[in-house]
Amino acid sequence: MTELLRVIQFYNSGGHHCADDQGDTEDGYVPGAGTNLSCRPHSSDYAPDGPDWRISLTELLRVIQFYNSGGYRYCLEEGTEDGFCPGLA
């Protein structure tokens, strides 16, 4: 639930960026648009054309799908938009 709420926070704040000091936050990111993009984008920011430092409604719904299914698993061979499938292996 904590991870889902964090992604919702990024969605509601219009984006995310890297914390100046990675130890300042639980995951190294700060909600809202920012100029520090020196770290990797959040894993839920996978947009089909590459990460854009914003969580779209589609990306948020994907995280909710994983939460509701009890987890996710790597399944690149199945051709999903992000390389993962709902549910545990």
Image (tube, helix red, strand yellow):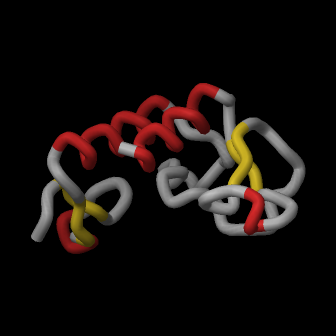
Q: How many marks?
A: 0
Locate the N terminus and report the quarter of the image it occupies.
Answer: top left
- Residue 82 spot, x, y in % from top left: 37, 58
Q: Residue furthest left?
A: 89
The residue at the point 17 percent across, 51 percent down is 70
- Residue 12 spot, x, y in % from top left: 60, 26
Q: Residue furthest top?
A: 12
Left or right relative to 38: residue 50: left
Question: Closer to the camera, 35 or 58?
Answer: 35
Left or right relative to 41: residue 71: left
Quadrant of residue 24 within the rendered picture: bottom right
In the picture shown, does residue 24 fall above or below 56? below
Left or right relative to 6: residue 59: left
The residue at the point 32 percent across, 65 percent down is 83
Locate the C terminus and report the quarter of the image it occupies.
Answer: bottom left
The residue at the point 83 percent across, 65 percent down is 21
The residue at the point 14 percent across, 57 percent down is 87
- Residue 39 spot, x, y in % from top left: 73, 68
Question: Closer to the camera, 26 or 19?
Answer: 26
In the picture shown, does residue 29 fall above or below 22? above
In the picture shown, does residue 27 fall above or below 74? above
Quadrant of residue 80 within the rendered picture: bottom left
- Residue 4 spot, x, y in % from top left: 41, 42
Left or right relative to 52: residue 47: left
